[in-house]
Image (tube, coloured by chain):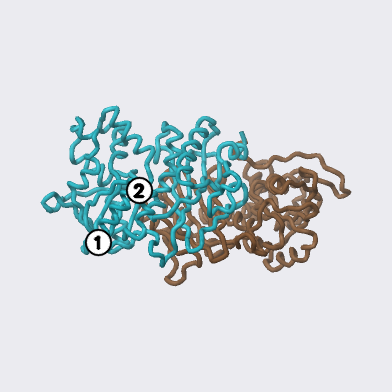
Chain colours: A brown, B cyan
């Protein structure tokens, strides 16, 4: 199968006539795709590259990989509060493997369709397996009452929140690595979190005009939160027992898997990576609005701390006493 | 060196305050970059992935590679007549090699600056060397008197043109492969064409409202022209002796390198690949306007044929008689 037949068969799945995504003027098949944000809107752009053996195992179900490759990009849009519009896919692979391509494109398009996000272009080539997606979303231009969420807006006194749960993806990775063991049921749940993350796209949009800053948690909570703190020139205090509930509240963990040390679970929560939840800040006056956004989008959120003036991150125990602990954020070159 | 220091040192080279590229609201350093085309404009998007050993030799000068990685993307913008605005870069590399990164980023930014194209985001990770750039440009929205150039606008009777020259990149590749030999001077000139192509960005913009269709020549003239013919539902006739001049006019070839067979040179012109010239069509009534666009942008153009109703591509000799010859377009999976 040649390059053009490959694109035609697996990826050139244009919309039905008249059903083109609003904002996409021209999709796959020319030198460029053409995008036009609605009047008063701007385009949010993000780009993530996934490498075999680094971001995913060679044995991963290709449909799950298709999902994840797009999900990690949609998660960046979510962190800006952008509505997904379109994406490009560049794909390098060692050979044309039709079953793999069928599964990969199925998983990819299932998530794309769920978010109304159209594949508008890309590239395919032969080489070590590598997936690079650039995603485009729409957000109101600056000056809007509900502008894009940035990392730089956190204010002293703001509450600090995290969506959903944290740490299961890391738990799955440690099972794969053989450093811990888990029941089949817990492993499946954790593996699904690692391989098929849920980008918090609806929550991100609902938080525009409510949250003061946001980031998506991809490299570990503490590391990603550090980006917000540096960009906003503030610090934060995290209530560790509350943060711990972001993993420990899982029924599978409370029901008889008590062999995990609390140190291990806390590491998973604070520095796990691959979570694709949102960490965000909001004024205390917006607590009801945050809960309303969470409720409207059926996404749990947990208030885990507070923004403070002193730079840096402080972990405190139930009595408010500091915990001394260091966690590394995930770094591909460290 | 960690991932964030690497980005900071080599790639987070934001514009001076107040000097941000028009259209770029937010650059490197948040979850997303924010782009806003001017009123009445839309965004042209293209994406190309370059893999070591496939698109470039491991021995290539990193500054030339930085240039080429962006140039092949700018060439897609040129084919749409778009003005470059911004790009994202995803980079996978086996290790942090500071001399390589210094050279690569230098070549990349030299070309980016020459076109006012700002790096607004990306990703870095460890893995086999792979460069994926997504580029953004601005074109007038549909309905404008000078809209984006598409592949689908060629009309029966239109002239067929090519910019610059064709075939030298392929000649250099064949020297590297050892199938032909060349003087040091010719090899250097050809190698420079292969490693540092010149995207025809100014010509593409000047051809909006003049040309009826355009494509950039990256996989070989006949193959890329085929995309225009299929999209426009037309055919074409190419005057082979004229096309031959696209390589043979080179002083280095006419001056004593007569050992290349005309078959070889014609193959380089028609199916060479890596040329990054524009192939375009225009009504005969626009001949003066085409020459004016060429002159205004200091880019030579050559009229090599004509668009016809009968599907397919016909090569004819000086007497208008058909040549029987088959050429393969470059295909990564063929």
Residue B276 horizontal side relative to residue B106, left or right: left
Residue A196 to residue A270: above or below = below
The residue lying at 29 percent from left, 32 percent from top is B175
Q: Which residue is mark 2?
A: B297
Along the line of sight, the residue nearer the viewer: A146 or B270: A146
**Chain bearing mark 1:** B
Quadrant housing the N terminus of chain B: top right
Element type at marker 2? loop
Whether residues under marks 2 and 1 lie with C-beta atoms below 8 angstroms apart, the answer is no
The residue lying at 30 percent from left, 63 percent from top is B232
Residue B162 horizontal side relative to residue B208, left or right: left
Residue B5 in picture, x, y percent from top left: 62, 37
Marks 2 and 1, how far apart at CA: 20 Å
Q: How many marks?
A: 2
The residue lying at 60 percent from left, 61 percent from top is A141
Residue B92 in picture, x, y percent from top left: 52, 41
Residue B254 in picture, x, y percent from top left: 20, 34
Rendering quarter of residue B56: top left
Residue A265 horizontal side relative to residue B247, left or right: right
Residue A222 to residue B253: above or below = below
Q: Which residue is mark 1?
A: B285
């Amino acid at each position: 199968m040649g390059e053009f037949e490959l694109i035609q068969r697996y990826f050139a799945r244009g919309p039905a006539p008249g059903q083109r995504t609003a904002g996409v003027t021209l999709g796959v098949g020319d030198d460029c795709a053409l995008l036009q944000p609605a009047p008063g809107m701007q385009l949010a752009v993000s780009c993530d590259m996934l490498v075999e053996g680094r971001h995913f195992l060679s044995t991963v179900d290709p449909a799950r990989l298709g999902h994840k490759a797009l999900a990690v990009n949609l998660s960046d849009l979510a962190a800006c509060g952008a509505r997904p519009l379109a994406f490009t896919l560049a794909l390098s692979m060692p050979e044309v493997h039709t079953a793999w391509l069928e599964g990969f494109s199925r998983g990819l398009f299932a998530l794309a369709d769920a978010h109304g996000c159209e594949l508008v272009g890309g590239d395919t080539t032969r080489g070590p397996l590598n997936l690079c997606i650039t995603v485009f979303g729409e957000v109101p231009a600056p000056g809007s009452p509900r502008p894009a969420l940035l990392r730089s807006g956190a204010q002293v006194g703001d509450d600090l929140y995290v969506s959903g749960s944290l740490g299961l993806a890391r738990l799955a990775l440690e099972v794969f690595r053989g450093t811990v063991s888990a029941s089949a049921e817990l492993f499946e749940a954790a593996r699904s979190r690692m391989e098929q993350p849920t980008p918090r796209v609806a929550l991100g949009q609902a938080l525009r005009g409510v949250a003061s800053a946001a980031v998506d948690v991809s490299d570990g909570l503490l590391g990603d939160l550090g980006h917000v703190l540096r960009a906003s020139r503030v610090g934060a205090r995290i209530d560790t027992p509350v943060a711990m509930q972001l993993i420990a509240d899982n029924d599978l963990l409370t029901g008889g898997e008590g062999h995990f040390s609390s140190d291990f679970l806390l590491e998973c929560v604070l520095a796990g990576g691959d979570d694709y939840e949102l960490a965000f800040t909001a004024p205390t006056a917006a607590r009801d609005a945050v809960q309303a956004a969470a409720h409207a989008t059926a996404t749990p959120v947990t208030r885990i701390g507070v923004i403070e003036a002193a730079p840096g991150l402080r972990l405190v125990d139930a009595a408010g006493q500091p915990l001394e602990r260091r966690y590394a954020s995930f770094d591909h070159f460290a």
